Image (cartoon, helix red, strand yellow):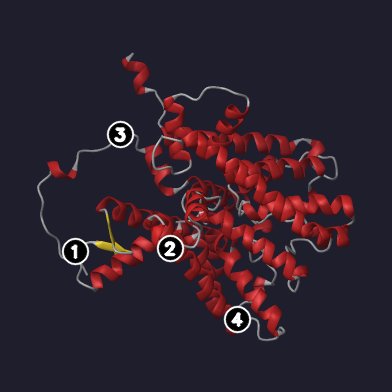
């Protein structure tokens, strides 16, 4: 019995293993000749990269999705996006619930960890709520976009395009099928189309808010004071991270566009940069200052319990809140008139340190091996670890080691820093209260 306990997997390890197995299965399916347009076997590393990017809802690609992959390949990619957006564990449990299987207490605890739940009570009802909301939102987005795509690609193909882009946007994946017009062009052809822009933006924001935030917003409507602290922080931070970059992009990048398109393009770039990876502009023409802003947005990512990756909005809010609290000589971090526990502050700073370290190390390694500028390399690694999918055109030409680095960063960014750390260090160390305390000068 003791031996069995030692080999029991933790929730974090099961989540990691689940993502890994889905990625591997996806790669093997994409290797099948039926998955490519030419009917040939695609190299394993490229399939692994594509499968990782889809499952980790990133959007970085080594092949143009529309022109390289067959209908079968596109369905595999779309399925991986949906599984990755919901979460591997959540998807598995939803299937069990649908077929009528009983969910044990241990399994409910695992599901709670997977969707960042507060407690085990009502976790199955919450998972069913998530499934219903996801289906409703994705189908709704597809229906609104359908007339535009039906006009451009025909009624049958247009329906497939509407559904594919709705799922990809809601899951913050950034995969697109616009390569039939020009390879790797994303949504550039729809820069001035209000319907496509507004629907894609709405799906990205909604998918990036987090499942528990949805429920809180649905229950309390516009009564901000009734929201939980989590919802207040998520909503406030999300609004700030959309408005400020949009203003910067409006004045810095889109002066040649008409007023309406200029506003639309600015907001779209602000929304998509932090979580999704679609683009309606040629990013290679952006100024270096604005590319640096985009790198910071990509590293932040979405919110906890959402379809998005990155450090998360709550993490950056705690870090900024700690700075402001220290500036005001407060002994604790305060957000919305609530003290934040010290363990949460430590976790936030640990996550930021891990993400920034891996992003910098990966970028420097890619720059050295590919002989590319640091800025372009940092852009790709920020996009990978933030599971965003924006690129300056570097990814398709990368060599083996650089691809492996991006694969590792995408996996880490989707699973999450704390989950990854808890999976490796499964046992807690000696508590700090057991050790002698001594002060240290900093700053």
- Of residues 308 and 371, the one nearer the viewer is 308
Q: Earlier in the sequence, mark 3 or mark 4?
A: 4
Q: Residue visible at 68% across and 58% down?
A: 397
Q: Earlier in the sequence, mark 4 or mark 2?
A: 2
Kindly indicate the quadrant of the structure image that contains residue 79: top right
Q: Residue visible at 65% across and 82% down?
A: 254
In the image, residue 328 above or below residue 6:
below
Residue, disc 2: 224
Q: Residue visible at 26% across and 68% down?
A: 325
Residue, disc 1: 331
Residue 411, percent across and down?
A: 53, 46
In the image, residue 80 above or below residue 236:
above
In the image, residue 143 above or below residue 80:
below
Q: Residues within 10 Å of mark 2 (few under 14, many from 20)?
A: few
Q: Residues within 10 Å of mark 1 (few under 14, many from 20)?
A: few
Query: Which of pointers 3 and 2 indicates the residue nearer the eye?
Result: 2
Q: CA distance from mark 3 to mark 1?
A: 30 Å
Callout 1 secondary element: loop
> What numbered label is drawn on residue 427?
3
Q: CA distance from mark 2 to mark 1?
A: 27 Å
Q: Earlier in the sequence, mark 3 or mark 2?
A: 2
């Amino acid at each position: 019995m003791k031996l069995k306990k030692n080999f029991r997997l933790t929730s974090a390890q099961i989540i990691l293993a689940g993502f890994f197995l889905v990625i591997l299965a996806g790669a093997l399916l994409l290797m099948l000749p039926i998955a490519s347009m030419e009917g040939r076997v695609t190299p394993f590393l490229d399939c692994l990269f594509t499968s990782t990017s889809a499952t980790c809802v990133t959007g970085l690609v080594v092949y143009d999705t529309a022109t390289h992959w067959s209908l079968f390949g596109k369905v595999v990619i779309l399925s991986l996006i949906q599984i990755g957006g919901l979460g591997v564990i959540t998807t598995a449990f939803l299937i069990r619930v649908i077929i009528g299987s009983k969910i044990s207490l241990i399994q409910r605890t695992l599901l709670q960890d997977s969707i960042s739940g507060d407690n085990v009570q009502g976790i199955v009802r919450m998972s069913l709520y998530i499934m219903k909301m996801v289906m409703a939102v994705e189908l709704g987005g597809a229906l609104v976009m359908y007339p535009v795509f039906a006009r451009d690609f025909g009624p049958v193909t247009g329906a497939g395009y509407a559904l594919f882009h709705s799922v990809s946007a809601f899951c913050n994946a950034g995969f697109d099928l616009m390569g039939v017009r020009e390879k790797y062009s994303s949504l550039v052809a729809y820069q001035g189309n209000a319907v496509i822009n507004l629907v894609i933006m709405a799906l990205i924001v909604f998918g990036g808010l987090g499942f528990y935030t949805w429920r809180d917003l649905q229950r309390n409507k516009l009564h901000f004071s009734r929201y939980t602290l989590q919802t207040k922080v998520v909503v406030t931070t999300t609004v700030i991270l959309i408005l400020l970059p949009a203003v910067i992009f409006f004045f810095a990048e889109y002066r040649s566009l008409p007023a309406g398109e200029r506003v639309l393009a600015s907001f779209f770039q602000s929304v998509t940069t932090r979580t999704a990876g679609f683009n309606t502009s040629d990013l290679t023409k952006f100024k270096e200052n604005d590319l640096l802003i985009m790198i910071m947005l990509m590293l932040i990512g979405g919110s906890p319990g959402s379809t998005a990756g990155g450090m998360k909005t709550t993490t950056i809010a705690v870090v900024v809140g700690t700075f402001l609290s220290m500036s005001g000589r407060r002994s604790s971090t305060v957000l919305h008139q609530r003290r934040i526990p010290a363990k949460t502050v430590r976790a936030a700073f640990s996550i930021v340190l891990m993400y920034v370290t891996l992003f910098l190390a990966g970028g420097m390694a890619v720059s050295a091996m590919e002989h590319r500028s640091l800025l372009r390399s940092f852009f790709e690694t920020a996009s990978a670890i933030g599971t965003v999918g924006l690129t300056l055109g570097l990814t398709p030409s990368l060599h083996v080691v650089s691809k492996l680095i991006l694969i590792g960063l995408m996996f880490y960014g989707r699973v999450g820093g704390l989950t990854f750390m808890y999976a490796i260090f499964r046992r807690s160390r000696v508590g700090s209260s057991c050790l002698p305390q001594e002060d240290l000068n900093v700053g």
